[in-house]
Image (tube, rainbow, N blue to C red):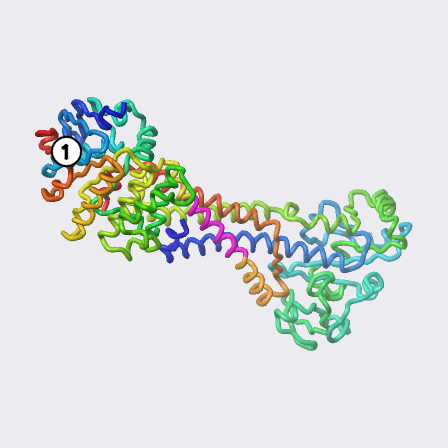
Amino acid sequence: MLENLKHRPIRTLLSVVAIAIQVTMVLTLVGLSEGMLDDQARRARGVGADVMVRAPSSSIITFSPNMPAKVVSVVEQQPNVKIATGVLTQGTGGFNYVTGVDLAQFNKLSGGFRFEKGGPFEHPDDVIVDQYYAEEHKLHVGSTVSILNRPWRVSGIYQPGMLTRVVVPLDVLQDLTANTGKITMVYVKLDNPAETTQAIATMRDRLKDYQIYSMEEYTSLFSVSNVPMLKEFIWIVIGLGVLVGFLVVFLSMYTAVLERTREIGVLKALGASPGYVLNILLRETTLLAIAGSVLGILLSYVTRFVIHTLTPGTLVQAIVVSWWPIAAAIALVGAILGAVYPGLKAARQDAIEALAYE
Amino acid sequence: MSDSPIISIRDLRKVYRVGEVEVQALRGVNLDIERGEFVSIVGPSGSGKSTLFYIIGGLAPPTSGSIRIGGRDLLKMTEAQRTELRKTSVGFVFQKYNLLPTLTARDNIEIARNIAHRNGPLDRDFQEVLELLGIANRLDHKPRALSGGEQQRVAIARAIVNGPAILLADEPTGNLDTENSKVVLRLLRDLNERTGQTILMITHNPEAAEYGHRIVRMRDGQIENS
């Protein structure tokens, strides 16, 4: 079996590489989805709040300025609340977001940004960015960067792991985006985090329809199934993956069967049943799929390295081990489907015609 | 039972359909082959000897008449039963050797055993057969590293490894030079004499045909004399 694959090394290599690309495609997409959601959850946790308040009917993954800022003072009056601060988060295109914070209040809640270089804003047009963003955009303290169609001066670069990658003063962002008096969410720190459940119940009573979560609940909502269309998108990529595997293996096995017509005739003369002949091809195909899957898994580490090197501030790819068997199974299904027709053709081959085949 | 012919053919007919034309390849063949016989079949191209071969070997179904191998009627056999017949009762040797090019000589022999669900090392008796065939020390080579004569001897080993009742050889010396032809023909005769292997051999070559106990001549889908 292995000998047959080694006998046509280029075709075997191409088939393995094509299957590997398909596996990498699935693993990279899933890795990006999980990686970015995980990163987002980690950064939400990094703030150090116990409870989150979001506007009614807002979606978990998107950020919309649909909450009046005065909710903050209502939250602050609730029992057990130590401190509350509102933030406004605004998309700047693609996967990038900027957050406006009331720095004094936010620092009290979170313990403040840990600056690698520089420090907090001193002027209304100051911006602080995290290390990844600085790396990706080659920024230093004092550099000018254009965000939301206007220039900003970088006053500080902080360690990643809190909020978004770009942070500006809240009032400046509100005015700039015509959201004066509006915020996206409220971070809340409690006096006694052990009583989070009661605190949330009280807040729900006071702020009807608002979405109020403990940080644990909130971050658990960052999952693939909660992102609109992401699951469908992954399914489409999986479908394409199966199709690619199918086509490549079909062509490879079909030509192999034509080439080996005479050999198949010999096997039949030796008493091989159609099932025996089919089995040989399916075993070769399985071997291709396994080799392709292993190579694909290795390649997903390469894509992660490339993505991290090129866009450390935008895209985060996780290595999702639980998807290895799934991606391999997808590759195997595509490959087996591709081998079925050539395999049946071989199995049904008339032995006498096959033996006469030149 | 052991005295009855191993192959018994009566009024065997085979009609092929090529497009809309019916081709009568066999027109009533009668033939008995005794156990342990070495029979040469000669005849011009198109005389039906290959068709007869394929039917005896279970590769093609007959159209009518009767053909019994070891007492079993081939006419009533299903495709699966004919596959079983090829696996257990018949061994083929072809003009073009037909070894699998990607496998070593040993693996070419092993695959025939594998198909017949016999695994494990080759038995002692068969080792002697390999010595007799003169290929015992050539088994780890692939076909392209073997001469035509050696390839054909490997093919003979492959054909008899499962102990078939009949060895069918279709122009076994057709691709060999005189020297190698003689070696192969002598081996077939030795095999027949030492192990009692029944052999049917198609040949164009009158000298090769002389190695058999008797010569059967075919013409126009019938046997001239026997």
Label 1 resides on the chain identified as B
Q: Position of residue B116 (x, y in %)?
A: 37, 37
- In the figure, B28 relative to A33: above or below? above
Residue at the location (19% across, 29% down)? B33
For this rendering, which residue is in front, B225 or A335? B225
Mark 1, secondary structure of its residue: loop
Report how many numbered discs are placed on residues in the image: 1
| Left or right position of B194 against A83 | left
Q: Position of residue A67 (x, y in %)?
A: 76, 52
For this rendering, which residue is in front, A150 or A91? A91
| Left or right position of B111 against A297 | left
Q: Quadrant of residue A300?
A: bottom right
Which residue is denoted by mark 1 in the rendering?
B48
User: Does B148 appear in magenta?
Assistant: no
Q: Position of residue A335 (x, y in %)?
A: 45, 46
- For the C terminus of chain B, which image quadrant? top left
Q: Quadrant of residue B67?
A: top left
For this rendering, which residue is in front, A161 or A11? A11
Range of magenta residues: A283-297
Residue at the location (90% across, 51% down)? A80
Residue type, label 1: Gly
Residue at the location (36% across, 48% down)? B107
- In the figure, A2 relative to A138: above or below? above
| Left or right position of A68 against B23 | right
- For the N terminus of chain B, which image quadrant? top left
User: Does A284 appear in magenta?
Assistant: yes
Q: Position of residue B70 (x, y in %)?
A: 27, 26
For this rendering, which residue is in front, A55 or A83? A83
| Left or right position of B32 against A87 | left
Mark 1 crowd level (few <14, some 14–19, many ≥20, 10 Å Cα): many
Is residue A149 among the parts visible in the rendering? yes
